[in-house]
Image: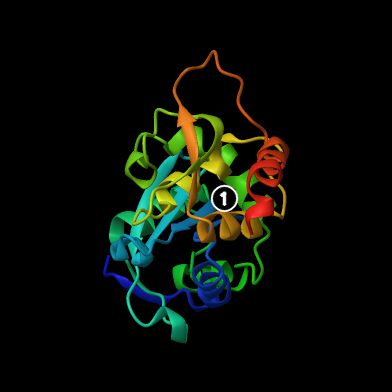
Amino acid sequence: MPDIKFNFSNLKNIYSEAWGGNDPTIAFEIREGAGCFVFMMFLSKEDAEQNDRLFVYFRNINTLITIKLYGSHAAGDFMAYIKAREQDLIRQELQLQGGGNPFNLEHFLNTLNNAIPQFLPPTTKTEVLQRTWPSIRTEMRTLVDDAHKTVLIGLKPLPEGKKPKDKTLRKLYLHVNGVTNEIGEFLNVIRSRNITLAWTDDQTRTAKSFAQLLTDFNQKYRNQM
């Protein structure tokens, strides 16, 4: 099968919001027909290559793919080349292997594109990532720092010249209960204060909730702003 060239143009709004708002994580789920497709992007000012990578997880067949995106994303160009393997996986996810009515893949890609949300609440990202991460964490280990450290133990001021890493902060979506729509604003604030998050792999420690994290920040740092 020849490659299909397709523009996921409806990513523009949530991509621009994630990039400009300093909340550089995109995650949402589209259910179409018998299939369930999880779209994820992990943008980074530290690693430019990440800004062109679209991860798609096929929930029914438990398969993750990475699609390279081309073009000016700010202008709405998210050009992908859907190869034969990816086309076959889409059919498997939709459970179309048994024949039946002819399947128009380009029409289906347009349906997916039209279903991309134009606003992405942090609670949606959190729910999608926490449900999906156990199935993909081995393949995605490089997208977070110290992937084995999953227990949040608090805030950590950084010395001058050091900046919080997206790879550390995005773990808040993956491993913390009680995350709300305030997360984007909170991450912006701690970035501006040069504060990161501290994690441990000691499972005997009690993990902090997002509410506790906010309380700690207000007690220790709010009066410094």
Front position in the image: 187 or 58: 187
Instruction: Tell me if 211 is positioned left or right of 158 in this view.
Output: right
- Decide if residue 98 is in sight here: no
Q: The N terminus lies in which quarter of the figure?
A: bottom left
Residue that appears at 55% across and 71% down? 113
Looking at the image, residue 19 lies above or below residue 98: below
Color theme of the render = rainbow
Q: Is residue 105 above or below residue 181?
A: below
Residue drawn 61% across the image and 20% down it: 206
Q: Residue furthest bottom?
A: 75
Task: Give the residue type that dot 1 points to.
Answer: Gly
Residue carrying label 1: 35
Q: How many marks?
A: 1
Measuring from the top left, give residue 155's x and y in whole percent.
55, 39
Residue in the image at 53% along x and 59% along y? 26
Nearest the eye: 7 or 183: 183
Number of residues whose C-alpha sits closer than 10 Å to that of mark 1, classed few (under 14), some (14–19) or many (20 or more): some
Q: Nearer the viewer, residue 113 or 191?
A: 191
- Considering every residue shown, the one lying at the far left of the view is 2
Disc 1 element: strand
Q: Quadrant of the C terminus?
A: bottom right
